C-alpha cells in the first residue's frame, strides 16, 4: 500500500512514526512554512502541489492508494484541495480532525469567524495583546497599531505589527510557563485560533486562571462528506482495515 500523508501537525508526526514500522510505502508532505521542521522517520517532500490539478497528478503518477490529510485545522485551502483531488482520482481520503477546544468553567471567550473580526474585537482603546495565531495571519493587526502586541510563533514573522515584541517558540508549553508569560508581559487579552490539541492548550488554562479574556477564531468548515477521525491511532486503524482493499490495479 502506498500512502501520502499531508502533514505539519502533531498528529501527522505521530502517524508517521507508526507508519515507519509497517511494510507499507509512506511519504509525508510538508508545506514548507516552518524553516526547521521536526525530523521525520519516513520520506518527506516539501512544498505545494500546484493546486487540485497538481495534487491529482501526483496521486496518479505515484499510484497513491490512500491519502491521509493531517494538515492544520486552519489549512482550509489544502483541505479543500485534498478533497477535490481525491474525488477526481478516486483515491480514498481520511481527514485527521482533532477536537476543537472548548472553554472551561470561568473562561471568557469572544468567538469570531475571521482574523479581521479578531482584530476588530480588540477595540479602539490600547490594550496589551498576546497573539498566538501564526506568522501568516498578522496582517489585520497591523491596522490596529494602538495595541501593544506580543507575538509568539515558531519562526520570526516577516511583517509583525508595528512595535510588536516577537517571541519564537515551539510547543508543547507548560501551564506554569504560560501563566508566567502572561504575567511578565501584563497581557490583557489573548488572540488564538481554535486549533485544538494538547501542544498549546496550556495557554488557555493560564488565561482562565488569570482572568485574561480570549478572542477565539473558530475553524473553517470542512468539505461536506469528508471522512474524519480524531487521532493518529484511529487513522492507522483505518489504514490497517483497508490495507487489502485500497491497492489499485
Image (cartoon, rainbow, N blue to C red):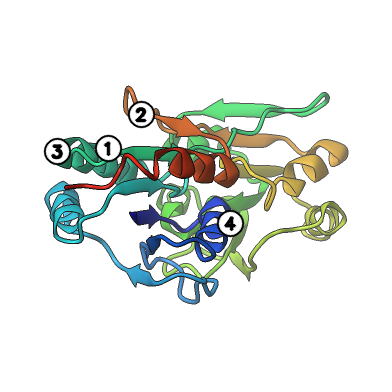
Q: Earlier in the sequence, mark 4 or mark 3?
A: 4
Q: Residues within 10 Å of mark 3 (few under 14, many from 20)?
A: few
What is the CA distance from the residue labelled 4 to the residue labelled 3?
28 Å
Q: Secondary structure at mark 2?
A: loop
**Dot label at residue 226:** 2
- Which of discs 4 and 1 lies nearer the camera? The answer is 4
What is the CA distance from the residue labelled 2 to the residue labelled 3?
14 Å
Q: Earlier in the sequence, mark 1 or mark 3?
A: 1
The answer to whether residue 200 is seen in the rendering is yes
Residue named by callout 1? 83
Q: Residues within 10 Å of mark 1 (few under 14, many from 20)?
A: many
Q: Earlier in the sequence, mark 2 or mark 3?
A: 3
Q: Is residue 72 above or below residue 169?
A: above
**Dot label at residue 114:** none
Q: Is residue 164 above or below residue 60?
A: below
Check contact, mark 2 vs mark 4: CB within 8 A. no
Q: Secondary structure at mark 1?
A: helix
The front one of 63 and 172 is: 63
Report whether 99 appears left or right of 56.
Answer: right
Q: Position of residue 47 (x, y in %)?
A: 29, 67
Q: Secondary structure at mark 4?
A: helix
Q: Earlier in the sequence, mark 4 or mark 1?
A: 4
What is the CA distance from the residue labelled 4 to the residue labelled 1?
22 Å
What is the CA distance from the residue labelled 1 to the residue labelled 3?
9 Å
Give me the residue at 60% from left, 52% from top.
132
Q: Earlier in the sequence, mark 2 or mark 4?
A: 4
- Which of discs 1 and 3 lies nearer the camera? The answer is 3
The front one of 120 and 73 is: 73
Q: Position of residue 233 (x, y in %)?
A: 59, 44
Residue named by callout 4? 14
Amino acid at each position: 500500500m502506498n500512502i501520502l500523508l499531508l502533514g505539519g501537525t502533531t498528529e501527522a508526526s505521530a502517524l508517521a512514526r507508526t507508519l515507519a514500522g509497517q511494510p507499507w510505502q509512506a511519504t509525508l508532505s510538508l508545506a514548507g512554512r516552518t524553516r526547521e521542521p521536526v525530523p521525520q522517520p519516513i520520506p518527506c517532500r516539501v512544498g505545494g502541489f500546484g493546486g487540485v490539478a497538481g495534487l491529482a497528478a501526483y496521486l496518479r503518477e505515484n499510484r497513491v492508494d490512500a491519502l491521509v490529510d493531517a494538515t492544520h485545522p486552519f489549512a482550509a485551502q489544502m483541505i479543500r484541495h485534498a478533497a477535490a483531488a481525491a474525488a477526481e482520482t478516486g483515491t480514498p481520503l481520511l481527514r485527521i480532525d482533532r477536537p476543537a477546544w472548548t472553554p472551561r468553567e470561568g473562561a471568557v471567550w469572544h468567538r469570531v469567524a475571521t482574523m479581521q473580526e479578531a482584530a476588530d474585537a480588540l477595540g479602539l482603546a490600547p490594550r496589551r495583546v498576546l497573539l498566538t495565531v501564526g506568522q501568516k495571519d498578522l496582517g489585520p493587526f497591523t491596522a490596529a497599531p494602538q495595541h501593544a502586541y506580543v507575538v509568539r510563533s515558531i519562526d520570526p514573522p516577516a511583517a509583525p505589527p508595528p512595535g510588536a515584541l516577537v517571541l519564537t517558540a515551539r510547543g508543547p508549553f507548560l501551564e506554569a510557563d504560560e501563566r508566567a508569560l502572561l504575567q511578565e508581559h501584563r497581557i490583557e487579552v489573548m488572540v488564538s485560533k481554535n486549533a485544538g490539541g494538547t501542544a498549546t492548550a496550556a495557554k488557555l488554562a493560564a488565561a482562565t486562571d488569570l482572568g485574561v479574556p480570549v478572542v477565539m477564531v473558530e475553524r473553517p468548515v470542512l468539505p461536506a462528506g469528508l471522512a474524519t477521525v480524531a487521532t493518529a491511532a484511529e487513522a492507522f486503524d483505518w489504514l490497517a482495515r483497508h490495507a487489502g482493499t485500497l491497492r489499485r490495479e
